[in-house]
Amino acid sequence: MKFHMIAGGPKPVAPFSHAVETDGFVLVTGQMPDTPEAPGVLPEGIVAQTHAVMANLKKVLNGLGLGFEHVAMARIYLTRFKQDYAAMNETYRSYFAPDRLPARTCVGVTGLAYDALIEIDLIARRPAD
């Protein structure tokens, strides 16, 4: 296994790697909607927070030479499921080609770090040589 910390990537708030790679799969740690410049400071609303989470995921993927087209699975955690699901879905969908949507799980949770509205983790796959 390879344990990855991405230079300039999101600042970890706990003891974990940005991603772990094994057998061609890349497991990307759940990302929060903050920035390395302002850890713990979140934009307002689900649309802005979804964009911020996707930007953090993109930094990790790009740091490993991957992109959203390599994502096989996404897990999404929402604190206000009924209220935010539709807007999150529309925003999330904009990051993927219509014919390359990953498998996905989306669940409602009672709380996230920093009182975030959303967290997303990914499983990506390196292309075969």
Image (cartoon, helix red, strand yellow):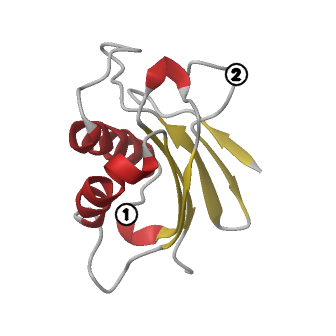
**Does 36 sit left or right of 77 as displayed?**
left
Residue 68 — which label? 1
Q: Nearer the viewer, residue 100 or 107?
A: 107
Q: Amino acid at mark 2?
A: Pro
Q: Is residue 1 above or below residue 73?
A: above
Q: Nearer the viewer, residue 123 or 74?
A: 74
Residue 15 — which label? 2
Q: Position of residue 17 (x, y in %)?
A: 64, 34
Residue 12 — which label? none
**Count of marks placed on residues:** 2
Residue at horizontal 41%, vertical 35%? 117
Q: CA distance from mark 1 to mark 2?
A: 25 Å
Residue at horizontal 39%, vertical 14%? 39
Q: Amino acid at mark 1?
A: Phe
Q: Position of residue 47 (x, y in %)?
A: 23, 44
Of mark 1 and mark 2, the one earlier in the sequence is 2
Q: Position of residue 129 (x, y in %)?
A: 55, 80
Q: Is residue 41 above or below residue 96?
A: above
**Does 85 sit left or right of 25 as displayed?**
left
**Does 44 sit left or right of 126 as displayed?**
left
Q: Nearer the viewer, residue 97 or 44?
A: 44
